Structures are given as structure tokens and as C-alpha cells.
Amino acid sequence: MQSAPILVFGRTGQVAQELARLSRSQQIAMIFAGRETLDLAAGGDPGALIAQIKPSAVINAAAYTAVDRAEQEEAQAFQLNAHAPGQMARTCAAQNISFIHYSTDYVFDGLLDRPYREDDATGPRSVYGLSKRAGEEAVLAAGGRAIVLRTAWVVGAFGSNFVKTMLRLAQTRDEIGVVADQIGRPTWSRSVAQAGLAALELLARSPQSAGTYHAGGADDASWADLAAGTFERSGALGLASARVKPITTADYPTPAVRPANSRLDSSKFASLADWQPMAWTKALDHILKDIATSPEGPDA
């Protein structure tokens, strides 16, 4: 029997909202600390909140995710993505509390010609990637019972993400140019949330399993593939649809460098935890049905 709730940092993001849904459906006690509870960006001390609540475990689903804006807001990105997770990890280590921290494919340079494994060399090429890598290092340096879960291309019915952006653009455009030369493994936000709970279970039965794991989607796609897959399904559900025009990264320059290869090999985590990666087409079916039945639709 769970003796204390799980403390989740983050409340309105994609993964935090999926964790909230899982907490209701699985009757798992969770407390969500959003910005109104503790402003991590302003230097709020997560350690003090952990000490006050005395949770059974901590999941950090809070992050600075504005990839392009991070190029001008380095201090803010590092505060949320590196310093705050480090504080959480050190407090959890001192109090022997299991800690799950989410990270990203952006810690890699994206130049490999195969999916990235956990032991591949990192080489972030953006401020966002550098801040997330610094967060990984801070969490692992704390030496506690912690797992870093890297994921990528997270999409779902909640928060802001690529699928919802495509649906919004399709409301006013017949054709949308979408990058076709960046490859990843689209990952349902609910799968990411489930991976966090599976990581806690893994730590409970095998504390020595602390470390870094990948928890992404099962199969490959380009952004253009994901957009096309979205529009192949959206019309039948009463959602907007558009034609996809494949373009190159050079056609759509951004302040931050995007990895050309964002594929994560999740086989190690799947072999150890009660979790399996999901095909992105199957994930899309769930996501679009969620959006279509939401009172707010794609703007939720």
C-alpha cells in the first residue's frame, strides 16, 4: 500500500496532464506542483517542497521546452532544465526517495545513422540540448536512486505539440510545408507518463537499476510522415485536414539546430521495465480520438 503520494513537478505540460489522468484511472495518489505552487524558473527551492510533503517518490515533468527561445534565454533554460532538477535529485538522494527525471534526444548531435543507445556519446548542438544534458549530469551526480528517461517527439491531446499545431494550421491552410529530412520516433505523451511510473516500479524492485534509459516510440517517421498520418485520420473525426508538402530543414531555418536523427533505441528499458514502446500510428489513433472528443478540441 502506498504510504505517501508521488510528488510531480509540473502541472500543465503534456506529460504532467497524462500523469494526472493515470493517477485518476489507476487510483495512484499524486500531488502536482505547478508554477502557482512553486516557481522553479524564479529560483524556487524544490528541496523545501519535497521536505515538506515527504512524498513516496518524485517525478520531474517540469522543463523549459521553448527550443528556439532558449538560444536567447540561456539562463532561464539552465535554471529549469539543470539547476532545479539537480536540487530535486540531491534532496531525494539525501532522503532516500526515488526520483524520475525526463530528458531529451537533443542531448545528441543527431549525426548517427542508427537509433541512439544510452551509452552513445552526447553532443548537444543547442542551448536547450546543453541545458538538458547539464540536468542529466546533475541528477546522476547526486548519487541517489534516480532514473533519467530520455524521450523524443512527444505528442498528445494535452499541452502544445506538433500534432495539435498541424491541426490548428489546417484550419486556415489547404497545404502545409513540413520538414521531411529529420527522422525520429514519435512518442505518445501517455506512454511517456507510463514510462515514468514503470521506472519507479523498476527502482522499487531493483535499486541498482538507477541510471539513464530511453523511452521513445517504436518506429521511425519524419515530421512530414507524422503530419500526413495526422491528416489521413483527422477528417474522419471531424477535425481539420490539409495536404502536406515535404520540405527540407534548409527550407525552414530555425534559431536552434534540430537533430537530423532523433531516433532513440528504447529496447534496454523495455527489457527491464513493465513498459513497451508504441507504434506512432497506433498512438495517433488514440491522440486524435482524444482531441476530437475534447470539448475544447485541438485548442485544448
Image: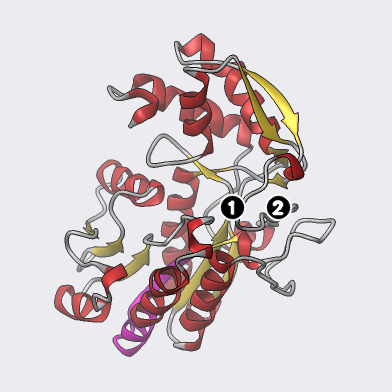
**Image point 48% across, 40% down: which residue?**
161
The magenta stretch spans residue 94: yes
The magenta stretch spans residue 130: no
Asked whether 164 or 276 is in front, the reply is: 164
**Image point 62% across, 36% down: which residue?**
280
Which dot marks residue 152?
1
Inspect the image, locate mark 2, and give the three-letter code of the amino acid beneath it.
Arg
On screen, residue 250 versus residue 138, left or right, reads right
Q: Give the range drawn in magenta.
A: 89-102
The image position of residue 174, as x and y in percent, is: 59, 14
Asked whether 270 or 229 is in front, the reply is: 229
Q: Is residue 266 above or below residue 225?
A: below
CB within 8 Å, label 2 to label 1:
yes
At label 1, counting other C-alpha atoms closer than 10 Å, the crowd grade (few under 14, some 14-19, many 20 or more) is many
Which dot marks residue 85?
none
Q: Earlier in the sequence, mark 2 or mark 1?
A: 1
**What residue does disc 2 label?**
263
Q: Where, by quadrant of the figure, is residue 60 drawn?
A: bottom left
